[in-house]
Image (cartoon, helix red, strand yellow):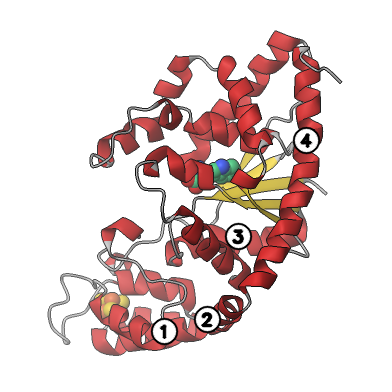
Amino acid sequence: MERVLAGIRPTGKLHWGNFFGALQNWVKLQNEYECFFFVADWHSLTSEYANTSKINQWTLEVLKDVFAAGVSPEKATIFIQSQIPEHAELHLLLSMITPLGWLERVPTYKEMKQELTDKDLNTYGFLGYPVLQSADILLYNAKKVPVGEDQVAHLELTRELVRRFHSLTGKNIFVEPQPLLTPTPRVPGLDRRKMSKSFGNAIWLDDQPKEIQAKAMLTLTDPARTHRNIPGNPDVCTVYDFHKLVSDQKTLQWSNEGCRNAGIGCVECKKAMAEKAIDFFKEFREKKDHWNKHEKQLLAAVAEGNKRAHQVASKMMEKVKGALGIKWN
Ligand code: TRP
Ligand code: SF4
């Protein structure tokens, strides 16, 4: 089986964007590949270094969401980045061969620095974010990495590092990873901007039925449809975008046609979407409840995952040190 590796940064509990953009895909991939999934808590430190008090709590929350979404420790190796020190060790060694220019021209680097103006991101660690990500991937010889569009440049840098390492050492020890693009495009938030924790426009995976209903009512519709008797265009409506994620074909058609011929009203349409969403995430809410009550069990499963990851990572580090000629035993 080919190996897949994916990481998720701990930002607190996860929302629909994280589910449809990543987790749903992980659940599928675990049946088709040998999967390594991890919480990238060190990556969070690259921007959250001034306030680290929540990172462990958020890591646990993300793990509960990963488990509740159906990613299973029996099928995949689930671990925490900071528990595998080899990630730091390889990051250091890769940093030695990484030209500054390669990092400075990564698009996410420039964008994040411009967007997150409340944080000082003029740090060594933040610039090195893709080097750490490369270490994550190369330690496990992952052939495929499921990512969104924005991460493709990071993988490109990883492949360039592989080639540079091989040509500098004369030893071919790494696999060049390829992106596995997530099928779901970006998920909008209630206000139509990208769904994001920091925009206050998210629907959380464990939102209760009442909260889902309330958020459905707040979701933006076709702005031109100002009256019940004016036909609308579902293609510019966020409620309809949500329908596409959670509703069956029949409901989709009902909403699409009813909107275009003014056969239904927006309130009706939102209520139907909320019902489907409540249904869609019912099992998730039940499982999350379960993991909230069985934290110890979850942590034990993750400890097993850490152990398995560590075995793979430490073997790889031996090869890396061998290639560099700095192995002592
Ligand atoms: N940078 C990724 C993100 O923001 C998270 C991540 C860290 C990752 N290390 C990784 C993803 C390794 C894939 C492989 O989504
Ligand atoms: Fe959107 Fe539904 Fe209203 Fe059409 S009827 S604008 S799809 S909420």
Vertical side of 68 occupied by 168: above or below:
above
Q: How far apart are marks 2 and 3 (CA)?
A: 19 Å
In x, y percent, where is residue 45? 45, 42
Which amino acid type corresponds to the residue marked 2 in the rendered image?
Arg
Which of the labelled discs sits on residue 285, or is there none? Answer: 2
Residue under pointer 1: 208
In the picture, measured across the screen, residue 56 lies left or right of residue 296, that is: left
Q: What element carries label 3?
A: helix
Which of the labelled discs sits on residue 25, or is there none? Answer: 3
- Figure quadrant, ligand 1: top right
**Is residue 133 among what the camera can see?**
yes
Q: Do the residues labelled 2 and 3 touch (CB within 8 Å)?
A: no
Whether disc 4's CB lies below 8 Å from ligand 1 is answered no
- In the image, 121 versus 31, the foreground residue is 121
Residue under pointer 4: 314
In x, y percent, where is residue 30? 72, 59
Q: Distance between the residues labelled 2 and 4?
A: 37 Å
| Within-10-Å neighbours for mark 1: few <14, some 14–19, many 20+ | few
